[in-house]
Amino acid sequence: MVTIHWKRLDPTAHAPTQGHAGDAGWDLYALQAVVLRADEPPQKIPTWLALQLPPGYAAWVVGRSGLTLLGFTVHTGLVDPHYRGEIGVMASVTGMAEVQIDAGSRIAQLVLFPVTDARWVSVEALEETTRGAAGFGSTGL
């Protein structure tokens, strides 16, 4: 079990919650109503909360599947363990003309993960594999 310290940046900020025990994502909430329109650039939706992730952990801000059905797209964001500012959710609308988000709505999820430190070594050649450099579509569509 990992302990995450969090802070309200507004008295109405909502703690992240899980829909079900054991879910991978923790729901993030909008504190104000917002209307997103398909012809507008992505908007930052405030959550008014800040986190203190433990050393060795980071988090992704990702979308919720139910909102995706409405055309509400969350632009994935990375939260580093040393970041202490507000967790904002960058979102836009695709497909539909507009999506209304009410104050208090669950708008995204926060997924925690361990971070591995790495040492990068420049080499002249990489080990050969059966896949090689075959990329996009290499296993069929």
Image: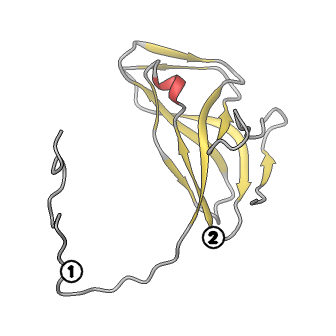
Query: Which three-letter amino acid code belongs to the residue tagged 1?
Result: Leu
**Colour pattern:** secondary structure
Q: Residues within 10 Å of mark 1 (few under 14, many from 20)?
A: few
Q: Residues within 10 Å of mark 2 (few under 14, many from 20)?
A: few
* Secondary-structure class at tag 1: loop
Near-viewer residue (64 or 101): 64
Residue at 46 percent of width and 14 percent of height:
98
Task: Using the image, determine if residue 26 lies above or below residue 69.
Answer: below
Instruction: In the rendered structure, find residue 56 and report the number of the disc placed on it.
Output: 2
Residue at 66 percent of width and 29 percent of height:
30
Q: Position of residue 62 (x, y in %)?
A: 52, 41
Q: Is residue 6 left or right of residue 90?
A: right
3D distance between C-alphas at marks 1 and 2? 28 Å
Near-viewer residue (126 or 128): 128
Task: Using the image, determine if residue 97 lies above or below residue 86.
Answer: above
Return the residue at label 1. Answer: 126
Q: Earlier in the sequence, mark 1 or mark 2?
A: 2
Tell us which disc is closer to us: 1 or 2.
1
Query: Which three-letter amino acid code belongs to the residue tagged 2?
Result: Gly
Outermost residue on the right side: it is: 11
* Secondary-structure class at tag 2: loop
Q: Position of residue 84 (x, y in %)?
A: 69, 58
Residue 115 lies in what quarter of the image? Answer: bottom right
